Image: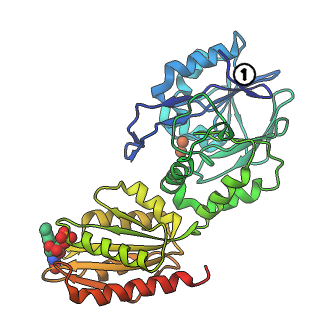
Amino acid sequence: MRQLISNDIYYVGASDRKISLFENYIPLNYGVSYNSYLILDEKTCLLDTVDESKSTYFFKKVAETLNDRELDYLVVLHMEPDHCALINELLLRYPNTKVISNSQVFKMIKQFFNLDIKNQIVVKEGDTIKLGKHELKFIAAPMVHWPEVMFCYDTYSKTLFSADAFGSFGALSGNLFYDEVKDDNYFNEARRYYTNIVGKYGANVCNVYNKIKDLDIKMIMPLHSYLWRKDFNLLIDKYLKWATYTPEDKEVVIIYASMYGNTEEVACRLADILANKGLKNIKVYDCSKVDETVLIAEIFRVSHIVLASPTYNLAIYPKMHSLLQGLINLGVKNRTFALIENGTWAANSNKLISEELSKLKNTTIISNKVSIKSSYNVCDEQSLENLASSLVEDMKKEA
Ligand SMILES: Cc1cc2nc3c(=O)[nH]c(=O)nc-3n(C[C@H](O)[C@H](O)[C@H](O)COP(=O)(O)O)c2cc1C
Ligand SMILES: [Fe+2]
Ligand SMILES: [Fe+2]
């Protein structure tokens, strides 16, 4: 069976529902798709391969779609193994295929597969390859998500093949286009995908966006998740917010660490006080229970974050510390934090967390901090109330 998308472009990708950890650390509840596209023009051209786990299905689809035609070209847009793993095998099956990509990709092919490709066509920014009616124009997209990444724009179908950009977690279930499904969870997963995978490279995403923003785009075909042919603004608006580290929602997320429930109680009391003050959609998360990739996505989403942590061996509680390292590594900025610490003999986590947060650009820490001694006591009520009032005041400020 052939899966025609449009204008002689066929889908030959596959979805993986068995995988539990993407890149062996990011939990996947809804699987992931590895998209691959085959254009049947005067020349036939495959754009990227798929993860090794989907090899059998992928090669069957490629063969069925080619229907006895030769494979003239393979375009490689990204060398992460979830897309490039089958290059070697593909060239064994289709030895006359010419590989089109940039010089960095060919260097990586040598590194990954110890393979010198004889039939190679080296392209750079702005170069074009004609397949017949279709003409592919290459656009460098360095660090979205690796240095060798390219986009490619088909001037005939006006399709942007966007590599990992505009992708998401989540398997595809027959319907390829976002406008064909009701997937309420899509943007949560797309955010989690973007922030944890590409989140560090917002400046690079903005650079490549400036290169594509004036193109006449009718379809976007990423390497993961749904394809797009309308409502691009939904996707682009989110992407620009994420890439510029701009909060989407003026809301509060409270993330606590707690071994014995005392810090948890304080975090929950704060949520109740904030709700009493009229705040909506407050979220409370236990950083030992909720995966760090979810917390990072939530921190990208909102404007105000409360971190509540026990002092632990004179340091920050390990899970909270790990989250902070994640934020620093991703270059999160433009956020307001509020802090609560707990300590029984030498409370110190507010100071230590403040030092970590000072590594984030354009980040404010609300000056009222709360320090609990072992457990919540009525005498803590006022300081919690003060913190809540400061948060609410701060949220009234213009972004
Ligand atoms: C392994 C361990 C290490 C701790 N280290 C410190 C510390 O360095 N300084 C301190 O003041 N309290 C320390 N505490 C005490 C906790 O901060 C205190 O028990 C706090 O109430 C924990 O809050 P929770 O009930 O939310 O888990 C430690 C507790 C544990 C279990
Ligand atoms: Fe990637
Ligand atoms: Fe990918």
Residue to which mark 1 is pinned: 72
- Residue 78 at x, y percent in the picture: 59, 41
Where is 45 relative to 26, above or below? above
Does residue 233 appear to the left or right of 344 in the view shown? right
Where is 370 relative to 109, above or below? below
Q: Quadrant of the C terminus?
A: bottom right
Which residue is at 48% across, 59% downward?
297
Does residue 23 appear to the left or right of 64 in the view shown? left
Query: Ligand 1 appears in which quadrant?
Result: bottom left
Which residue is at 60% across, 18% downward?
61
Please tell me in which quadrant of the rendered image residue 23 appears: top left
Does residue 187 appear to the left or right of 21 in the view shown? right
Q: Quadrant of the N terminus?
A: top right
Which residue is at 45% across, 27% downward?
53
Q: Residue furthest left?
A: 345
Where is 136 relative to 191, above or below? above
Which scheme is used to colour this image of the protein? Answer: rainbow
Where is 142 relative to 372, above or below? above
- Residue 264 at x, y percent in the picture: 26, 69
Helix, strand or loop at mark 1: loop
- Asked whether residue 114 is in view, the answer is no
Please tell me in which quadrant of the rendered image residue 268 appears: bottom left
- Asked whether residue 297 is in view, the answer is yes
Q: Nearer the viewer, residue 106 or 340?
A: 340
Which residue is at 21% across, 79% downward?
376
Within 10 Å of the Cα at label 1, are there few (<14), some (14-19), or many (20+) other Cα atoms? some
Asked if disc 1 is less than 8 Å from ligand 3, the answer is no
- Residue 24 at x, y percent in the picture: 37, 42
Instruction: Check disc 1 and give the amino acid type.
Output: Asp
Q: Nearer the viewer, residue 283 or 145?
A: 283
Q: How many marks?
A: 1
Q: Nearer the viewer, residue 96 or 224?
A: 224
